[in-house]
């Protein structure tokens, strides 16, 4: 059953089309991320769902009921704002209880509901503290507890982790996912953070220029991007522009302006000779060029180059290679300690399969 249904939603600010004919349905218990760059329309879409912004056209249903004319507090939607929006003069318990009191919940039932929420977000014993006495992560949990306390049909999270440092973001990302799953909350997350969207969500909705350009599982949007924008926006990638110079066995050969030959199994949707080619850094294998004896097959890409930078980043090592024509290639290899160390100036060979090349 769909808890949320948007159909042909449009919102304009003068000549600017912020949301352009957006249709979206969300099943009960699903976690959906709206992902895109600043100005793509994701926050405006969230505000339309919440009732803070009116849509110019289209319909909006929550739980099968048209809510377009309802005020925000009449929509049974839980909200977690980017800055948490906790009341500084209220204790943790009072903040969590605020929505319950505002909606007329019977007073005798509020304390037990607050206790349940405190336990859910692991803040039992902190009910008498004030927001100023809490860490950023604890404030985020209080805001989440307040959003969930009213038992909303939909939970809306606006950049929920952006105010936290990198380490805490990772920890709370895992906790947030567990909490949302445990209560079966139907959730819309707005974020510009790719890792956050891919790790939190059942599905990712990519927005660009006010429109939805792709919807799919995290794996689908990463491995099979719908267009060049999605491929560029989601994850890291290396790009080549080339002209098709024949091919066989389902593999096409492209030659770049620098004279590099790139083989690819996929083909652009349009029948044309020129194409943009993309390969993910983690799909590139690097071997020592001095000792390399590589049998180049029709399904493989073998590119000689020189290492110009090596950046160990914990579990990963980022290696930048300069190829023919000063083309730079980023490769990411796992740092297992058994991998031979690479140094700047070292001749290497970059290997990747034609199946790993995306063509646009």
Image (tube, rainbow, N blue to C red):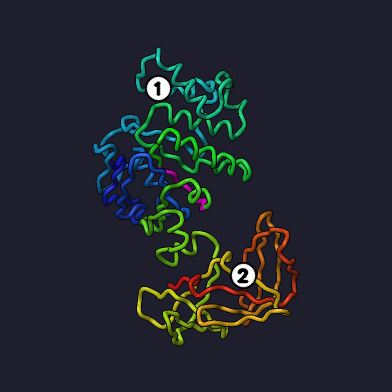
Of all residues, the one furthest to the top in this rendering is 108
Residue 244 lies in quadrant: bottom left
Q: How many marks?
A: 2
Crowding at dot 2, Cα within 10 Å, few <14 / some 14-19 / many 20+, comes out as some
Indicate the position of residue 74 as horizontal and vertical percent values: 31, 30
- Location of the N terminus (image quadrant): top left
Residue 316 lies in quadrant: bottom right
The answer to whether 354 is drawn above or below residue 25 in the figure is: below
The answer to whether 314 is drawn above or below residue 83 in the figure is: below
Q: Residue at x 46, y 16 (%)?
A: 111
For marks 1 and 2, give the one nearer the viewer. Answer: 2
- Location of the C terminus (image quadrant): bottom left
Q: Is residue 85 magenta?
A: no
Crowding at dot 1, Cα within 10 Å, few <14 / some 14-19 / many 20+, comes out as many
Q: Residue at x 56, y 31 (%)?
A: 139
Label 2 SS: strand
Q: Residue at x 47, y 64 (%)?
A: 231
As drawn, is 20 to the left or to the right of 160?
Answer: left
Between residue 18 and residue 218, name the one nearer to us.
218
Which residue, given by chain and number where applicable, does mark 1 sit on? 100
Q: Answer with mark 1 or mark 2, whichever residue precedes in sequence.
A: 1
Label 1 SS: helix
Magenta segment range?
A: 188-194
In the picture, the disc for residue 51 is none
Indicate the position of residue 314 as horizontal and vertical percent values: 68, 54
The answer to whether 186 is drawn above or below residue 274 in the figure is: above
Between residue 157 and residue 261, name the one nearer to us.
261
Of all residues, the one furthest to the bottom in this rendering is 245
Indicate the position of residue 35 as horizontal and vertical percent values: 45, 52
Indicate the position of residue 229 as horizontal and vertical percent values: 44, 64
Q: Residue at x 42, y 17 (%)?
A: 110
In the picture, the disc for residue 285 is 2
């Amino acid at each position: 059953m769909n808890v949320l249904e948007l159909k042909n939603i449009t919102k304009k600010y003068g000549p600017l089309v912020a949301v352009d004919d957006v249709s979206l349905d969300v099943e009960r218990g699903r976690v959906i991320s709206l992902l895109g760059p600043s100005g793509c329309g994701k926050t405006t879409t969230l505000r339309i769902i919440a009732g803070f912004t009116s849509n110019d056209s289209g319909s909006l249903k929550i739980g099968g009921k048209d809510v377009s004319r309802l005020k925000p507090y009449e929509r049974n939607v839980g909200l977690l704002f980017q800055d948490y929006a906790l009341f500084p003069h209220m204790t943790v318990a009072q903040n969590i209880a605020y929505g319950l009191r505002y909606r007329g919940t019977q007073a005798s039932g509020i304390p037990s509901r607050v206790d349940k929420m405190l336990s859910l977000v692991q803040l039992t014993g902190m009910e008498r503290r004030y927001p100023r006495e809490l860490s950023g992560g604890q404030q985020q949990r209080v805001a989440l507890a307040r959003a969930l306390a009213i038992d909303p049909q939909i939970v809306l999270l606006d950049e929920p982790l952006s105010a936290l440092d990198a380490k805490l973001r990772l920890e709370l990302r895992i906790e947030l996912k567990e909490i949302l799953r445990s209560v079966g909350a139907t959730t819309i997350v707005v974020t510009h953070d790719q890792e956050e969207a891919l790790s939190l969500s059942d599905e990712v909705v990519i927005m660009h220029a006010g429109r939805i350009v792709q919807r799919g599982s995290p794996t689908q949007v990463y491995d099979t991007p719908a267009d060049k924008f999605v491929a560029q926006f989601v994850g890291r990638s290396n790009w080549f522009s080339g002209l098709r110079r024949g091919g066989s066995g389902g593999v096409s050969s492209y030659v770049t302006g620098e004279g590099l030959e790139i083989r690819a199994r996929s083909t652009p949707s349009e029948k044309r000779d020129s194409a943009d080619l993309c390969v993910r850094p983690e799909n590139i294998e690097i071997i020592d060029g001095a000792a390399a004896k590589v049998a180049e097959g029709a399904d493989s890409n073998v590119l000689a180059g020189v290492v110009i930078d090596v950046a160990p980043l914990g579990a990963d090592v980022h290696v930048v290679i300069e190829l023919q024509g000063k083309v730079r290639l980023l490769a990411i290899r796992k740092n297992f300690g058994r991998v031979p160390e690479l140094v700047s100036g070292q001749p290497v060979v970059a290997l990747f399969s034609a199946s790993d090349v995306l063509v646009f």
